[in-house]
Amino acid sequence: MKRLFVSVLALVSALAIAQFVAAPKQIADLNWMVGSWKGTTKMNVQGMEMSMASTMKVTQYGSFLKFDSSNMVEGVGNMSEFGFLSWDEKNKYMFVNYTDWATTPRVEKGDMKEGSLVLISDPWDLGEEMGGVFISRSTLSKMGDKQMKIVIDFKNGDAWEKAGEAIFTKE
């Protein structure tokens, strides 16, 4: 009887924890992103044109989507990134991204606009050698079952300037 009680307690606990960490609907609606992706971003940053070949893996991680990417930036080198996308009533969508090119994470907040996820970063200091402080806007759009468009803009004064665009294909 004791063994049965412990087994039932363990099962109930596991189910309770699974319910506790379930993704909110807003994250679950983005599950189309889960999988492995490849793409090349054509970039123009501060007048420098370059391309960035990327692989990205998106996984469900409890109530978050986890993004892991490896990027080869033409003429510059490799950059690795990982981040977590969350959702809550106050911040809406929030993406916290870590890269080996910066000493601080990039924190972006946003919402869905016309079917696309639009995130705007807090000021993000990459250091003087990488161009200083940036504010970025990332727009992620589903383009079918196996394609996603990502547009990156940087704020320049009061205006947004397109810095890069890519079409990622799901493998």
Image (cartoon, rainbow, N blue to C red):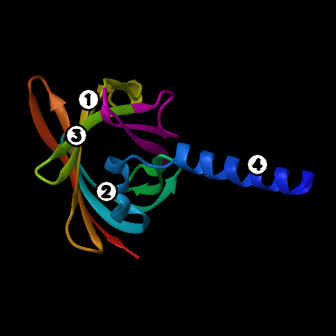
Front tag of 1 and 4 = 4
Write the start and end of the magenta stretch as one range.
Answer: 81-106
Farthest residue toward the right?
A: 2
Residue position marked by numbered label 3 in the rendering: 111
What is the secondary structure assignment of the residue under circle 3? strand
Which is nearer the N-term, disc 1 or disc 3? 3
Which is nearer the N-term, disc 4 or disc 2? 4
- Are there few (<14), some (14-19), or many (20+) residues within 10 Å of tag 1? some
Q: Position of residue 7 (x, y in %)?
A: 81, 56
Alpha carbon of mark 1 to alpha carbon of mark 2: how far? 27 Å
Residue position marked by numbered label 1 in the rendering: 135
- Are there few (<14), some (14-19), or many (20+) residues within 10 Å of tag 3? some
Q: Amino acid at mark 1?
A: Ile
Q: Amino acid at mark 2?
A: Asp
Query: Does the segment drawn in magenta span residue 88?
Result: yes
Residue position marked by numbered label 4 in the rendering: 9
Which is nearer the N-term, disc 1 or disc 2? 2
Q: Amino acid at mark 3?
A: Asp
